[in-house]
Amino acid sequence: MSVTLYVYLAIALVLLCFPRGWMRFGMRVTPKPPRKVNQHKVERDPYDRAPKPLQEMAKSRNWVDFFRAAVGGYAVMLVAAQWTRVPDAAPTGWVLTVAGLTWGIGALVQMVRWEGRLGLFAPVFFLQGLGVGVMGSVIGFIAMFGAWALSPVLPGFGALLFVQGGFTLCLALLIKDAQPVTGMVLTGVIWMPVLISVLLKKRLTGSFDKKFKVVPRDGRDD
């Protein structure tokens, strides 16, 4: 393997395995606005857990996740193509296993949070960017926009990831020039946070960035 491919592999590992939570500890480019004395907390209905597309797309860190995962996933595919005996063929065997483990470890690093207690974050944009980088723009963007189109009727971020994986799997099997086995492995990576959430009996959350004030449906402020 040439030096260039080692560089691609190193870039991919850094982009995929850099924890999203570390982005909050960087220096601010612009000064922080003064905090209002009577600043109200953001209110939400505890029963309303449906993903909010416009709110999520307005967060800059989500797009950082998307693009770094897309570039990292594409870099892994470039390296995998050179490791196979036929560079133009889809990765198989141990090459696909190593690639899948790289994607899975990256997703796991983004998902697990420890801030006083264990929390599970749904790395939606990270996995959607990974889909674009690994499967290409057609499958990646169709699966992404298809999942977000159904998000208003989904009960939570875990369901959104399940739909995302379902779209990816179906498209990988139906599109003629796609790589079905690679699509199956990627679908497993996308479904992994959902499975871990079920096994640990902990809900996947879409954000650890804001403090919410829970407003019950009966109007009382508990």
Image (cartoon, rainbow, N blue to C red):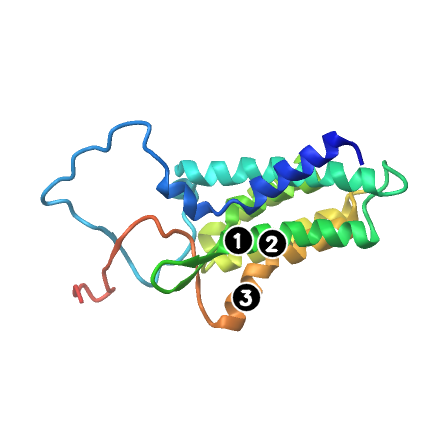
Q: Nearer the viewer, mark 1 or mark 3?
A: 1
Q: Is residue 1 left or right of residue 218?
A: right
Residue 142 point in image, percent of width and height: 63, 41
Q: Earlier in the sequence, mark 3 or mark 2?
A: 2
Near mark 1 (Cα within 10 A), the count class, few <14, some 14-19 or many ≥20, is some
Q: Disc 3 marks which amino acid?
A: Ile
Which residue is at the front of the view, 122 or 100?
100
* Callout 3 secondary element: helix
Residue under the point 50% across and 55% down: 111
Label at residue 109: 1
Q: Could you tell me which residue is drawn at 34 percent across and 34 percent down?
A: 27
Placement of the C terminus among the 4 image quadrants = bottom left
Up/down of 211 relative to 25, above or below: below
- Image point (52%, 50%), residue name: 150
> How many residues crowd mark 2 within 10 Å: few (<14), some (14–19), many (20+)?
some
Mark 2: amino acid: Ile
Question: Is 200 located above or below residue 151 in the figure?
Answer: below
Q: Quadrant of residue 156?
A: bottom left
Q: Report whether 40 appears left or right of 189.
A: left
* Residues tagged 2 and 1 counted as in contact (Cβ below 8 A): yes
